[in-house]
Amino acid sequence: MQSKTISSPVGARRATFTEWIGRDPTVTMLCAFILAAALVFGALTPTRFFSGETFRAMAFEMPELGILALAMMVPLMSGGLNLAIIATSNLSGLVTAAIVTSLIHPSSSPMAVAGVIALALLAGMATSLLIGFITGYIVAFLGVHPILVTLGTMTAVKGISVYVTNGGVIGGFPAAILWMGNGTLLGVPVSMILFIFCAVVIALIMTHTPFGVAVRLIGSNEKATRYSGVATNWMLVGVYVLSSLLCWMASIIMMARFNSARAGYAESYLLITILAAVLGGVDPNGGFGRVLGLFLSLILLQEISTGFNLLGFSPHLTEAIWGATMLFAIFIALLRNQWSLRLWRSKTAQ
Amino acid sequence: MRKQVRLVFRHDGQLALIIAAMAIIFSIVSPAFRSTGNLVSLLENYSVMAIMAAGLLVVLISGGIDISFAAIAAVTQYVVALILINAGGNWLVAFALAAAFGGLLGVVNALLIYYLRALSVIVTISTMTCYFALLMFVTEGKSLFNLPDWFTDDLTFWSIPFPVLVAAIVLIITAFILSRLSIGRQVYGLGGNPEAAKRMGSNVLGLQCFVYGYSGLMAGIAGLVQAHRVEEVVPNALIGRELDVLAAVVLGGASLTGGIGSVSGTILGIVLLAILQNGLTLLGVSSYAFGFVTGVVILLSVSATAYTAKRQARSSARHAV
Amino acid sequence: MTEATNSPRGQEAGSSPVPSASNGAAPFVEMRGISKRFGGVRALTDVNFTILAGEIHCLAGENGCGKSTLIKILSGVHVPNEGEIILEGKSYSHLSPAASQRFGVQIIYQDLSLFPNLSVAENIAFRHQVETPFRLTRQQAMRKQAEAVMERLKISLPLDELVGSLPIATRQLVAICRALSAQARLVVMDEPTASLTHQEVDALLATIHGLKSHGIATVFVSHRLDEVMTIAERVTVLRDGSNVGTYRVRDIDRRRLGELITGQVFESSLKAPFLTEATPALEVRGLTRQGQYAGVDLVVRPGEVLGITGRLGSGRTELALSLFGMNPPDAGEIRVNDKVVRLRNNREAIRHGIAYVSEDRLSLGLVMPQSIADNTVVSVLDRLTGALGLIDAVRRNQTIDHWIFQELRVKTSTADRPVQQLSGGNQQRVVLAKWLATEPRVLILDSPTVGVDIGAKAGIYQVIDALAARGLAIILISDEVEEVLHESHRILVMLSGRIAATYDPHRVNEQELLEAIHA
């Protein structure tokens, strides 16, 4: 393009960190909600809400839903959905639990225990990877709507769990596993550390790897992304494998917290994870979403839950408020869009 | 409408063939399968699901989805039962109350979806959470056992159990609305091309109120029938059913993207699941294996449908020139 | 009716707009002095637009010139700020959608707004479902109505077929029937021929003449000059929201119309002959795919622009997709730089230096809601990956700066904006940036100027010339004969999946090329 002289190259201006946070309206809104809720709960139960005890409790409760919400977020961003996350977690938990409880005896040496735990965790991981691969393969290569596929895998996977256990519980774990759900490291719950680790890794993957960029583009327009030379089918397989891998992480924490594994644990979380992700700014149509937003939405949900608990309300009221918060957030987003549309119109008018 | 009929028939025909094959195998292997008693109780077991499916089908055809109907059924069931226990009543009152209350909750969904301009799946997940959580909060999870006798007594008409009769009537009405009434055709239009429906002057808000209201109404009736069958009202008995019903309707050929689906297909989808589970029981397969088999059937069915669609698209692209 | 002669812009353009009622027909509708503002943006300024009963009128102008706003005022969607609309001798300050339809104004949008899942008969008679939501549908009445309309148009449609299973051209007829069934007296068609083959356009034309014989006026909204010249009787040109003028088509030629629309004079010249005998960048022998194309031979050398033209459905796009690895051929060989290659997917094609700009920019070329930056780097993600599989931010930003801001000079302040906020011409530049970032040897451009304004087209031609000058081998596929003629060194004509002829642009004229395409 010698014919084009570069008169004044318009350099891309890069946003500063504060702009980066501030320009995301979801983040602003969630921060405001979190602050408002803290003020209300703080005013109602001043001594108990702002206490180390409360923060510890919150930090123990959040990771489970948090990791599952991450597992929902990745497929949502690719324009899909994974309804099988809970079933996957439970089955890989059961596999791990079965190996641990059947191979470890009180007489086992510490080395043997460590070996068995490692083996069990790997077996759980393999289970979830297999489920993720099958789901992803059907979604990508057969082109079936993800809701349908994961509805099927959810039913089938849960079916396997129920069949193998006859609906029962496998429990009684060595201390090392319990530590992952209930222990602390430098005062921080281990499960929280695991969750933050997962969140950071997913954030990194979604923003700074070819896979993440491709997934976001696929979420907006799979065909155009394929035409640009991206192996979209394999990326989609990757999406569901990654989602399942997160389910495996969640299964470890669940196992440790309940000290058992079962086919039907945490089922009420399934639709709540969608709620948490969408509240955190993940576009349910695909293509957009940030781990930071999801993290804040989880803090908000946890804050509401803990606050109502302190006030002595039943956990059911908490869930009702969660649903209402979601609707309210949609309402705020609608107002914001209309407002910015008007602003845009008056700007272009000049 | 011949082509449309043909299309519907293709999917329905395949399902019917599979069902017939299964029925024949099961009746040969297990004589108990073909006993009238077994078939009647089979129908009765699935009548509640069929009523909910009728409502969900209409929503799916309009291009939306309703996740909240099981919660609506639970709430309506509880509210109506309380009224009947405390104020008395009869079946007519019970149905009127259930229809009105369920319909109302459904219309709330429609208004939220329309005015918040949000995806139906997100809105109905939210309302599901709200409805159900509030029910559990207010009732503290307590069941109602002291239902009136007239309500819990078994009823049969011409030896057809009452729930089966209700399901049959509801399905016929739904089929009539969808295929013969203008508003039903508009629902198909809305699902097929929402923008075009708007341009042609369809009242989108009105249609959505009808569609989600109808789903809520059906959920209310389903809740009532379920309470009659089990003779008690347990607040969380119906929770988790939403995805089962969705699976049945989808097996019946309804599309999640709207515009496609039929009552006949939905019935076949439910019958398929029913016969499968019943046959497995009679064959002595542990009931714990149902989930797995059902899941595999869903996966096979949706994969086969997608695969044929893909192959057709490919071959038609080849002969485009 | 002297609005055209009064138009200062018409005079400035130096042409002689005609009094519109010269043929003596009565006006169906007169729009006088229409102005419309959105917020503070002036979309239309003092526009006059008169449609005679039963005439075929074209509304022409570039994207954003106010065509659709004017139509929306006519259909009652928008309320004008100033001006009057005269219908049946009465003056109205604005119309409601219902009033507009009552007067017989029917709009057929570009997407046709049909219901793919309903039968033809139901589509034609859908209006009745809307009027009486709780009434029984009457199949017989619906069919009768549809048949009556088809009778008037002397066409026959399969009433029981689902509209979704029909070809686009037939769907268009369904849309026209639906408009007529509402007692239309004016049918407005928005870009009706965008996706039709030449024969289908002819059929449409016949149908429109049928409308005329029933005294129904037709207004085309179009920016395809060929079409305007062949179909319309009169043309009204808008530019920047104002009247340029109304002209009888037989009084002006295509070039003149182009100048009226853009307000600029374009000089198009042929390319100098291409003489180099360098190793071909791409060579194809006997390439065949059953049912799509057969026995295709072609050669393109570095620095050469090879034009391929043919009708929609002639196999041109299918051939291009095969060269891009997305439509595997059944037989034949593809050579890149004199080496035989097998392309199993487009990643392999990209690796061999082949890039493909799709004709469907909206759904295949770009991921519209996502940022300019991501759309640019998507094709080279693996090349930007550094340690730990993470994208090297420095190289990513360099790539974007280089291609978006320096080479293609996309008009935007930041690459973080969604692509959909850019104009058509700038979007096409982002597509080019994406492909140039892969450092291709061969660039296949499939209808690169579709939906791009005439003014912006010139910019894209400049880019093509510059790329060829840099030594890229370019295959330019287009059904706009003029474009191929002026932009290529050599022209292949595709006809029913075969290369029918090769032309030297210096030894052929537009008319001969057109005839070759439609032979």
Image: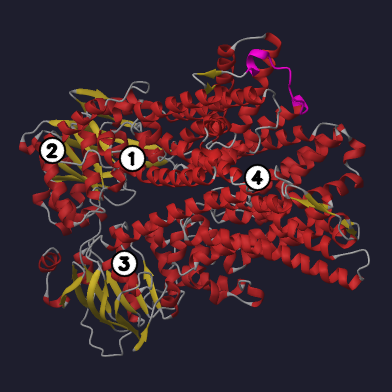
Answer yes or no: do the residues labelled 4 and 1 have beta carbons within 8 Å?
A: no
Q: Tag 3: residue type?
A: Asp
Position of A239 compared to A49: left or right? left
- Taking the spot 60% from the left edge, 59% from the top edge, the residue there is A240
Residue interval drawn in magenta: B138-153
Mark 3–mark 2 Cα distance, whole angstroms, equals 36 Å
Mark 3–mark 1 Cα distance, whole angstroms, equals 30 Å
- Which of the two discs, 3 and 2, labels the residue nearer the N terminus? 2
Q: Which residue is mark 1?
A: C115
Query: Helix, strand or loop at disc 1?
Result: loop
CA neighbours of label 1 inside 10 A, class few (<14), some (14 to 19), many (20+): many
Does residue C46 appear in the picture of this structure?
A: yes
Q: Which residue is mark 2?
A: C153
Mark 4–mark 2 Cα distance, whole angstroms, equals 64 Å
Q: Quadrant of residue C308?
A: bottom left
Q: Main secondary structure of the magenta part?
A: loop
Tag 3 and tag 4 share a subunit: no
Mark 4–mark 1 Cα distance, whole angstroms, equals 44 Å
Q: Which residue is mark 3?
A: C446
Observer-nearest of B298 and B278: B278
Q: Tag 2: residue type?
A: Leu
Q: Which residue is mark 4?
A: B287
Q: Chain of mark 4?
A: B
